[in-house]
Image: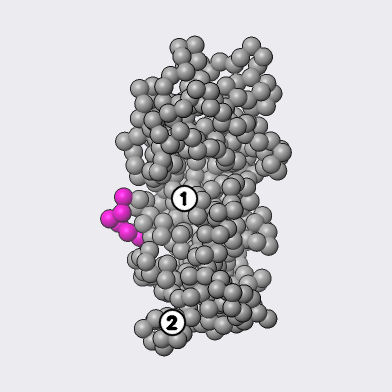
Amino acid sequence: MSVESASGEAITTDTPRAIAKDAYLYAFAMLENYQTMYKQAVDRQAPEYIGGFGHYRHYSEPFTPDNNDIVSPNNDTPYSWARLDLRAEPWVLSVPAVPKDRYYVCQWFDLFTHNFAYVGVRATGFDAGHYLFAGPRWQGDAPPGITRVFNSETDLIGTLTRTALNGPEDVPNLKAIQSQMQLRPLSAFLGRPAPPPAPLVTFPPYDKARGSSVDFIVYLNFLLAFAQPPYAGERAMMARFATIGIGPGKPFNTSTLDTATRDELDAGVAAAKAALEERLDKTFTSSGMFGSRSELGDDYIMRRNMGASKGLYGNSDVEAWYGGYVGDGRTLSRVRFPAGQLPPAKFFWSATLYTLPDRQLYANPKSRYSIGDRTKGLTSEAAGSLVVYVGHESPGPDKESNWLPAPAGHYSLVYRIYGPSQAATRGEWKLPPLESIA
């Protein structure tokens, strides 16, 4: 079997170049995840450090333009982060009961970035519960008191937990809910002695340049050791990858490669990067980028890569819908939602404005960074339509209640729908256009 290279030459799928290309595409989302995991759970000097594995770090205060820790920050649902190591035993997440008007979601992802589990008001309801997370080698049964068991393909997993915040005055209520989200090893949950600890791991510091070269194999081999046994549908793929030195925990040293092999592997990595850029240029929606392995379908490798490129740890379509525009604040613009055609949200929707290219909140006299169905004072037109105004200059005193201030330059306006309807997830409902009106 042969394929055509970027230069037009025919190459077989079993050449080191072709295998390296496919392996880099396979590894890309994992490397993006590892880069973040290393800072959060391993590097104590990183500002993103959350306390290591097995600890929740909660962010409770609303973001302002002075907060630059992350890009595209979200004031609707402040984040809580945690990472778990499931090698020694499963862990249990305990969540409190919440009022019917309080949205929260605990999104869990594996090393591949697949969203393999959801706990929250959409997925599991508003009641308290205890949820067990088990790694790929755990063979036990769910003990009494466990609400549900989630099985992961990988030993290392993480959560991006989001809890709705209804304005700065709501921070104490938010903190009360976050403080009741608890992570415990199964032995601690049951009040039993802990099993022997898992072997210590030396996590290789992540270097972006190495991860973007043939040395990506060093990181991939390290990460594959936490995903044993391999997913059944990938065994043939892994056997093919093994021919260039890829395998769980297998040492890899590029200095031992001969020049011809090194050049072939480098060419494969370059071809993979070109394939990613080509796909990115054709990807205009987040739909289908995030989800479980089965939800992503046969094209799951490229889909998860697009998700990692566009916005790592995005929610699955069933949980949240994302869309938006790029505009210029020097021109006053509007988004008009006709009566009965507001964003179809079971929970709530909002639009947040970010400066470009840094994707941070825009400092403005109104201290308004987002607008949505929870914004106080929004007014509708006589016919029932809702108009959101976006621009650097005020649209006028009679319209300022619906105004989202923008910089005198380019911006990104991101809409989020929490609990989207099937019409939204299937693409049948679409955002109205961003129209220039001045």
- Camera-nearest label, 2 or 1: 2
Question: In which quadrant of the rendered view does residue 242 lie?
Answer: bottom right
User: Helix or strand or loop: what does disc 2 sit on?
Assistant: helix
Q: Residues within 10 Å of mark 1 (few under 14, many from 20)?
A: many
Image quadrant holding the N terminus, namely bottom right
Question: Horizontal placement of 209 versus 274: left or right?
Answer: left
Compared with 223, 417 (above or below) is: above
Asked whether the beta carbons under mark 2 and mark 1 sit within 8 Å of each other, the answer is no
User: What residue type is disc 1 on?
Assistant: Leu
**Residue 242 can be seen in this image:** no
Which residue occupies the foreground of this view, 250 or 211? 211
Name the one closer to the observer, 409 or 95. Answer: 409
The residue under the point 66% across, 71% down is: 233
Look at the magenta stretch and give its main secondary structure. loop
Residue 20 colored magenta?
Answer: no
Residue 83 pos. (x, y %): 45, 55
Q: Quadrant of residue 387?
A: top right
Image point 53% across, 48% down: which residue? 314
State the image coordinates of residue 240 (x, y, percent, origin top left). 59, 80
The amino acid beneath tag 2 is Arg
In the image, 362 versus 134, the foreground residue is 362
Above or below, 132 relative to 327:
below
Q: Is residue 46 magenta?
A: yes
Residue indicated by mark 1: 183
- Residue at the image position 41 percent from the left and 26 percent from the top: 392
* Distance between mark 2 and mark 1 Cα atoms: 45 Å
> What segment is highlighted magenta in the picture?
42-47
Residue 155, disc: none
